[in-house]
Amino acid sequence: MNRKQKRNLYRIIAAGVLFALLMILQEVAGIVLNKYIWFALYMVPYVIVGYDILRKAYKGIRNRQVFDENFLMAIATVGAIAIGLLDTGDFAEAVAVMLFYQIGELFQSVAVGKSRKNISDLMDIRPDYANVLVDGELTQLDPDEVEIGTIITVLPGEKVPIDGVVTEGSSSLNTSALTGESVPRTVNTGDEIISGCININGLLRIKTTKEFGESTVSKILELVENASSRKSRSENFISKFARIYTPAVCFGALALAILPPLFILIFTGTHTWYTWIYRALTFLVISCPCAVVISIPLTFFAGIGGASKEGVLIKGSSYLETLSEVKTVAFDKTGTVTEGVFEVAGVHHNSRLESEVIEYAALAESFSNHPISKSLQKAYGRKLDKTRVTNVEEIAGHGVTAYVDGIKVAVGNAKLMDKLGLKYKNCHSVGTYVHVAIDGKYEGHILIADIIKPNSVEAIRRLHSNGVNRCVMLTGDAKEVAVAVANDLDIDEVFYELLPADKVTKVEQLLSETKGRAKVAFVGDGINDAPVLTRADIGIAMGAMGSDAAIEAADIVLMDDDPLKISKAIKIARKCMRIVYENIYFSIGVKLLCLLLGAIGIANMWIAIFADVGVMVIAVINAIRALMVKNL
Amino acid sequence: MKKSYKIDVDCANCANKMEQAAKNTAGVKDAVVNFMALKMNVEFEDGVDPKAVMKDVLNNCKKVEDDCEIFL
């Protein structure tokens, strides 16, 4: 609690104690005093708890703000006191209204402050300093002052302040603040490293490749802090509602104060002014829109905060709303549902051990820079001892022959096998493959393919089970590859051999085919998808760690490249929107019910203020629920 | 031109009122107040002096909600 909140708390406690005491004396002990003495006594807690409202109300009148909450509260309570003086002698009600109104305001202010703090703690990735060697001594500098190419030192337990490349040391990194991923990531000398990760155990020296302002951590903080500059439909609806609601209820109150008693006076000749004015004042108590208004932005704020904890950055509440209505998801293939790197996917028809075939092939190809050679080397996994390889002969358009440990090895396509007079088998799988012959004998072929990410199948299944009825894949790849991947993943439709511009056309086609409120999302790795990301109702960029272009172009950024996060993001959005609607219907519903009961005289001011504060407390607690998204 | 300002205000509806007041100020093309982030993003009309306009914005905001602040 800040100072202002504490002061208000003391005022509420002081007024509350006094008020309770007076109530006990009057109601329980049954002490009978003159009406004016009670009035004077009750005025003490009233003024303690409500003086600032009265002051603001006065200022409101001067600025001609008739529909200001403070003004309305002042009228309602002063009116109730006046009726007490003139008629009923009941002052407790007015004090109670003021007291509970202030309790409500305090609760709201504390809850909002708490959730602001919670969310800024969640995003506590801002590094405070960078360790730089100055004159042989490690000095803590402001990250802003560190130039590109400086060697910075990150000690165990510290945050990596600036993006760079590791020049010395190896360590495990905790990236959970960025990605929501709890498994540490290992970095070694030569690896790229992004700011915002926490160094767990080893000492790292990093050569910076960016300025602090351009580093990942700054980009993310900027994104999170500027989120929700675009408001959702629900927020706009609620602020419009508040603008109409308060004046409408006030006019209703005016009508209630004048018309019914006037009719009764004319037709029956009885005087009922006080009853109806009292009911009108009850209306004014209910006319405050704050309880309705607060919960909506709070829910969105909590939803966006909870999502960012899970590594899903959402650029504003309107995107959260759109995401919850997604029925069609279009995917880019390479790098989104597949790894985007070519890897050995298998060795077929071999009689020797798989690892042996790969070892021979990798060694034979070790002098080549061809991507296939790199994939073979990667699959081999160890350092290649090139001294084992002799008599290397590259035959253009065919492949390579070489002697490995004195044994003749041939690696290449069908033509090479024909040339060597060997029988071979073609591959049925999709991808690139090379035949291998060792010691004059055909040893099968090695399949090299862009492999599907381990989570892709599950990701598509979850999207389907979460009401996404159309999963579409858009790719520039050849038909066979595209169809094969689509079948493996159980994707509904696939469009292949597309140029980047064709992808935009396809997304436009999907947009025109999607009816009503249903929305189309496009998921890409953000590298050359910017136009498509912008064109879709909602653009989701994934694997965005370190890619500024993706962070700029997309509406939603998935910090790591796990496709499961797509359905998670949709679930978070749905939960958030469900809470938003619950809060809208609940708070407006209770308000309208109270107005009705107030008009027919069932709800008095006590009920009105309890309903008002109670609704707000419940709505705020419900809103905080949007933060809890871990187990969705 | 767009600029972002830090603000201080206590209730959500007051923030909405500030937004309306800012929108209705001469020289302001559009304004968005984010109550949870306590920020006001203002888009100015072409060729106006943001500092002068923001003074008017602050005055107009003070009229609708006395207990507010814009950190200029």
Image: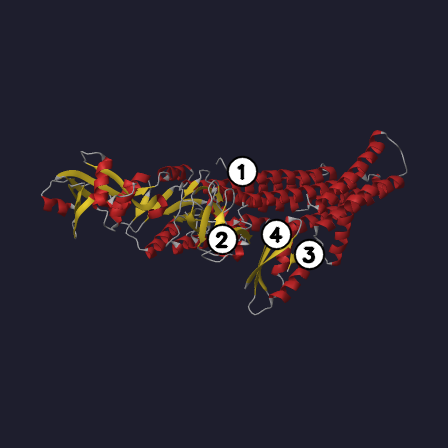
**Is residue A433 in view from this perspective?**
no
**Mark 3 to mark 1 CA distance (whole Å):** 36 Å
Crowding near the residue tagged with mark 4, few <14, some 14–19, many ≥20 C-alpha atoms within 10 Å: some
Q: Quadrant of residue A329?
A: top left
**Mark 2 to mark 4 CA distance (whole Å):** 20 Å
Q: Position of residue A557 (x, y in %)?
A: 45, 48
Residue type at mark 2: give it.
Lys
Crowding near the residue tagged with mark 1, few <14, some 14–19, many ≥20 C-alpha atoms within 10 Å: some
* Tag shown at residue A219: 2
Query: Between A631 and B13, which is closer to the camera in this rendering?
Result: A631
Q: Position of residue B24 (x, y in %)?
A: 62, 61
Residue type at mark 4: give it.
Leu
The residue pinned by badge 4 equals B38
Tags 3 and 2 on a common chain: no
Q: Quadrant of residue A96?
A: top right
**Is residue B62 in view from this perspective?**
yes
Which residue corresponds to the image point at 46% horizontal and 57% vertical from the top-left? A148
The residue pinned by badge 1 equals A628
For residue A616, side relative to residue A413 (left or right): right
Q: Quadrant of residue A448?
A: top left
Crowding near the residue tagged with mark 2, few <14, some 14–19, many ≥20 C-alpha atoms within 10 Å: some
* Tag shown at residue B64: 3
For residue A412, side relative to residue A132 (left or right): left
